[in-house]
Amino acid sequence: MTKPITEAAITAFFSTIAATIPASLTIADLGCSCGANSLFAVSEIISIMIDLCNAKKHELPEFQVFLNDLPGNDFNTLFSSFLPRFQEKLSEQMKSKYGASAALACFFNGVPGSFYGRLFAQESLHFIHSSYSLHWLSRVPRELEENKGNISMSRSSPPKLPGMVLTLHGRRSDDPSSEEYRGLWELLAIDLNEMVTEGLIEEEKLHSFNVPYYTPSPKEVRQEVEKQGSFSIDCLEMFEVNHDVIETDFDPNVVLEEAVDKIVGCLRAIAEPLLIHHFGEEIINEVFKRFRAKLGNRFSKEKIPLVSIIISLKKIT
Ligand SMILES: C[S@@+](CC[C@H](N)C(=O)[O-])C[C@H]1O[C@@H](n2cnc3c(N)ncnc32)[C@H](O)[C@@H]1O
C-alpha cells in the first residue's frame, strides 16, 4: 500500500534532478528496528532508484544507507545477521536484472539515537523513510502521569532533500479518545486493572504506568507539518489493515486462533519490555494469557482494523 507513494516521491525527485543525479545518494530509515523488516523498505527504495537510473541511462550512483533506531536496538544482530543476507540478495537481484558484471556500491551505517533529536549533518540526506515508528513519543506527556486506570491515550552542489515518506499508526476520528484509537491498549488496560483488583499488581504501580504512544488524526499530522514549516505535503492518505488477513480455506475457527496468536505476538513484542520495566517480569505470562482470552472473545464478534496514515513530504526550497 505504501510502495506507490514511495515510488511517486522518488520519481518526482529524479525528475527534478534530471541529468545531474548525484554520484552518491543518501537514504535514512528512522526506527529501522532489528529483523527481517528492517532492510525491506531500504531494498525497495534502492530498487526504485536503480530502475529510474537505468530508465534514464544514467550511471548508477553509490548508495549510502543510514539505519536509525534507539541505542538499545540490537544493531549487532542487524549488522551481523540480517545485513549479510540482504547484501547477498541485492547482489543476486542486480546480476539477474542487469547481467553478471553488474555491481552495486552500497554502504551501511548504524545511527543510534532518538529521531526527536538531531541525528544527521546538515543537508546530508536525499531521502528519509520511516515505517510505524512515529506514533512513539519521546516520553509520556506530563499531564498523563496521573492517567488513572488507562495506559494510553549535482556533484558540486549540496544535495537537496527530495522528501520523506512516513507511515505511522493513526486514527480516523478527530477525537483522541474515540473507540477506534484505544483498541488493543485498552484491552491490555482491562487486564491490568483486573490484576489490581485481584491483588496481583499494586494499584499505585498501575496509576503511574502510561505508554508513550499516540495515534494522530490526518488533520493533526497536517497541522504539525504546517506548523514546522520546512515541508510541503504531496500526499496524505489513510488505510486500514485487518489483523485477520490470513490466506485461507481452513476451518474458520483455526483462522481466528491464528489471527489472535498473531496479534498477541505483535503486541507482546512491543509491550513486554515496557511492562517488564515498570511491573517486573513475574506478571508477564499472566497478563498475556488474559489478553489472549479477551482478544479471542472480542475478535469472534468484530474485526479490529489497524488504521495507518502515510504522508509524503517535500522540502520547501
Ligand atoms: C514497530 S517498530 C517498526 C520497525 C520497522 N520500521 C517496520 O516498519 O517494520 C518501531 C521502531 O521504532 C523505534 N523507535 C521508537 N521511538 C524512536 C525514536 N524516538 N527514535 C528512533 N527510533 C525509535 C523502536 O525502537 C522500534 O524499533
Image: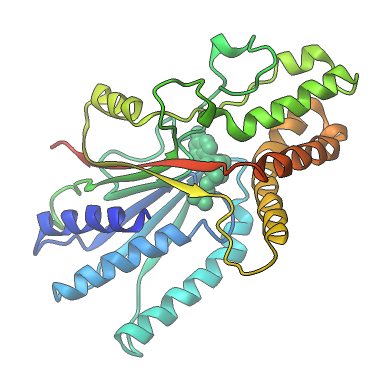
Residue drawn at x 48%, y 33% is: 135
User: On screen, 231 above or below 177?
Assistant: below
Drawn side of residue 197 relative to residue 162, left or right? right
Evaluate whether residue 32 shows in this view: no
Residue 295: x %, y % from top left = 70, 40
Q: Nearer the viewer, residue 230 or 288?
A: 288
Horizontal side, residue 51 vs residue 277: left or right: left
Q: Is residue 165 left or right of residue 42?
A: left
Task: Name the residue at 9% across, 61% down.
Answer: 18
In this view of the protein, which residue sits in the foreground, 301 or 82?
A: 301
- Position of residue 243 measured from the top left corner of the image (x, y, whole percent): 57, 50
In the figure, 103 relative to 222: above or below? below
Q: Quadrant of the C terminus?
A: top left
- Classify 176 as above or below 3: above
In the image, farthest residue toward the right: 199
> Number of labelled discs?
0
Q: Residue at x 38, y 55 (%)?
A: 1
Residue 72 location in percent, x, y?
A: 62, 41
Q: Position of residue 52 (x, y in %)?
A: 21, 68
Q: Quadrant of residue 292?
A: top right
Residue drawn where x is 48% and y is 76% of the image: 89
Q: Can residue 302 be seen in the rendering of this structure?
A: yes
Tell me if 163 is positioned left or right of 301 in this view: left
Rendered view: 254 above or below 166: below
> Which color scheme is applied?
rainbow
Displayed quadrant of residue 290: top right
